[in-house]
Image: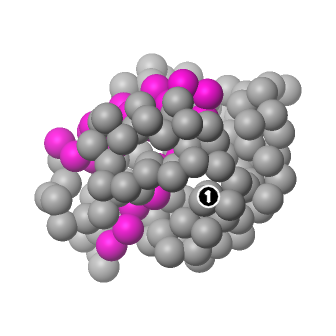
Amino acid sequence: MVVMVMDGQGGGIGAVIIKSLREQLTRDYEILALGTNSSATARMMKAGANRGATGENAIVRASLCANIIVGPLAIIMPNSMMGEVTTPMAEAVSSCEARKILIPLSQEKVTLAGFTGEPLPHLVNHAVQRVKELINDV
């Protein structure tokens, strides 16, 4: 089972996700850290990912082998994260066969109707719980 965590900018959200996954999952699952930039990847690696890679081609290729992809909603939106998410990145993530668990953080000019605006730690807990449920269903 391969869980891919994708993030950009400073990698803070991805690092929190990976740290929480490491605390709640056994080491039998491979966690990949995929960053839109090297700072994001490095921060996620420090949080406990098994392997990490940076950039468009790495994200496109890794999304093909992932069983589950976790990250902020922006990872499926071209030009989000101040332009760090390219169209090929967003397309690869959104169209691959992996199950996607997206954290609904507000983005530029996007409003999620019905979103309650919970704090990030609660959103990460929901995402990790969903990963655990998906792993148990396999």
Helix, strand or loop at label 1? It is helix
* Amino acid found under the numbered disc labelled 1: Ile
Residue 132: image location, x then y, percent: 28, 58
Residue 89 magenta-highlighted: no
- Identify residue for label 1: 59
Q: Image check: 35 left or right of 15? A: right
At a point 45% along the width and 64% down the height, the residue shown is 68
Residue 15 magenta-highlighted: yes
Q: How is the image coloured?
A: one colour
Q: Quadrant of residue 122?
A: top left
Quadrant location, the N terminus? bottom left
Q: Which is nearer the eye, 78 or 114? A: 78
Residue 113: image location, x then y, percent: 72, 34
Q: Which is nearer the eye, 60 or 103? A: 60
At a point 38% along the width and 68% down the height, the residue shown is 2
Q: Quadrant of residue 18?
A: top left
Q: Which is nearer the eye, 23 or 106? A: 23
At a point 22% along the width and 46% down the height, the residue shown is 22
Where does the magenta region start and end? 1-23
Q: Image check: 131 left or right of 27? A: right
Residue 121: image location, x then y, percent: 37, 26
Does the image show residue 132?
A: yes
Residue 29: image location, x then y, percent: 25, 65
Vertical relation: 76 (above or below) 111? below
Quadrant location, the C terminus? bottom left
Disc 1 crowd, CA 10 A, few/some/many (<14, 14-19, 20+) = many
Q: Image check: 137 left or right of 127? A: left
Q: Which is nearer the eye, 46 or 111? A: 46
Does the image show residue 70?
A: no
State the count of labels: 1
